Image (tube, grey):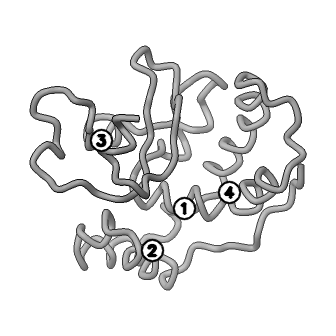
């Protein structure tokens, strides 16, 4: 597995581009974009990317993937800082000070993210019940808090993928 990361840096231009390309960020409005663009140190992705990449080999082994010597994992490592910055823009991960104190089994998700996740769980009154089916990405967290058990994209629509 390659250990080199891209030379990606969080800039105001990155924030504006990300907010224009992710509807979930664009919907937060210009004030959110300005706040993020003016507070770039909060979006520094180095610590989050480092923690994510330190967990990758163990997580793959636990899922029966013995070799991480593959172009896909090279891509993940090379783009880990970009991915971590996008997750930080979405307020998914913990703050850096909290990340540094986590064990390998602890969740990296912020309480804000866990409490506000839009859900197609089939439970009554799910957030997206009354919204037309959407294309996009999905993530299933284990009900017992063991972590993400499946993630991907849904070109057939999120509800269609959920039924599968």
The quarter of the displayed image where residue 6 is located: bottom right
Q: Position of residue 106 (x, y in %)?
A: 56, 24
Which residue is at a point 33% across and 75% down the rendered structure image? 33
Q: Residues within 10 Å of mark 1 (few under 14, many from 20)?
A: many
Pointer 2 with pointer 4, Cβ within 8 A = no
Q: Position of residue 125 (x, y in %)?
A: 10, 33
- Residue in the foreground of this view, choosing between 103 and 143: 143
Q: Is residue 117 left or right of residue 87?
A: left
Q: Position of residue 108 (x, y in %)?
A: 52, 36
Q: Earlier in the sequence, mark 2 or mark 4?
A: 2
Which residue is at a point 70% across and 29% down the rendered structure image? 59
The residue where tag 3 is placed is: 117
Q: Is residue 82 above or below residue 93?
A: below
The residue where tag 1 is placed is: 85
Q: Position of residue 152 (x, y in %)?
A: 51, 47
Q: Determine the CA span between mark 2 and mark 4.
A: 15 Å
Q: Earlier in the sequence, mark 4 or mark 1?
A: 4
Q: Earlier in the sequence, mark 3 or mark 1?
A: 1
Q: Quadrant of the C terminus?
A: top left
Q: Earlier in the sequence, mark 1 or mark 2?
A: 2
Q: Determine the CA span between mark 4 and mark 1.
A: 9 Å
Q: Residues within 10 Å of mark 2 (few under 14, many from 20)?
A: some
Q: Determine the CA span between mark 1 and mark 2.
A: 10 Å
Q: Is residue 131 left or right of residue 8?
A: left
Given this view, does label 1 or label 2 mark the residue nearer the observer? Answer: 2
Tell me, for residue 157, which label it has, or none.
none
Q: Secondary structure at mark 3?
A: loop
Pointer 1 with pointer 2, Cβ within 8 A = yes
The residue where tag 2 is placed is: 18
Q: Is residue 82 above or below residue 21?
A: above
Which residue is at a point 45% across and 22% down the rendered structure image? 142
Q: Earlier in the sequence, mark 3 or mark 2?
A: 2
């Amino acid at each position: 597995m390659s250990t080199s990361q891209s030379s990606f840096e969080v800039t105001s231009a990155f924030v504006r581009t990300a907010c224009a390309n992710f509807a979930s960020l664009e919907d937060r409005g210009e004030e959110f974009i300005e706040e993020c663009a003016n507070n770039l140190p909060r979006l520094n992705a180095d610590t989050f990317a480092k923690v994510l990449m330190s967990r990758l080999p163990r997580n793959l082994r636990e899922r029966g993937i013995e070799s991480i010597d593959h172009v896909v994992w090279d891509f993940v490592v090379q783009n880990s800082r970009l991915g971590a910055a996008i997750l930080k823009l979405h307020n998914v991960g913990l703050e850096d000070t909290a990340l540094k104190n986590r064990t390998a089994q602890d969740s990296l998700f912020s309480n804000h993210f866990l409490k506000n996740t839009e859900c197609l769980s089939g439970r009554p009154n799910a957030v997206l019940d009354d919204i037309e089916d959407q294309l996009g990405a999905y993530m299933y967290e284990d009900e017992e808090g063991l972590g993400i058990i499946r993630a991907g994209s849904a070109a057939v629509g999120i509800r269609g993928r959920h039924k599968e």
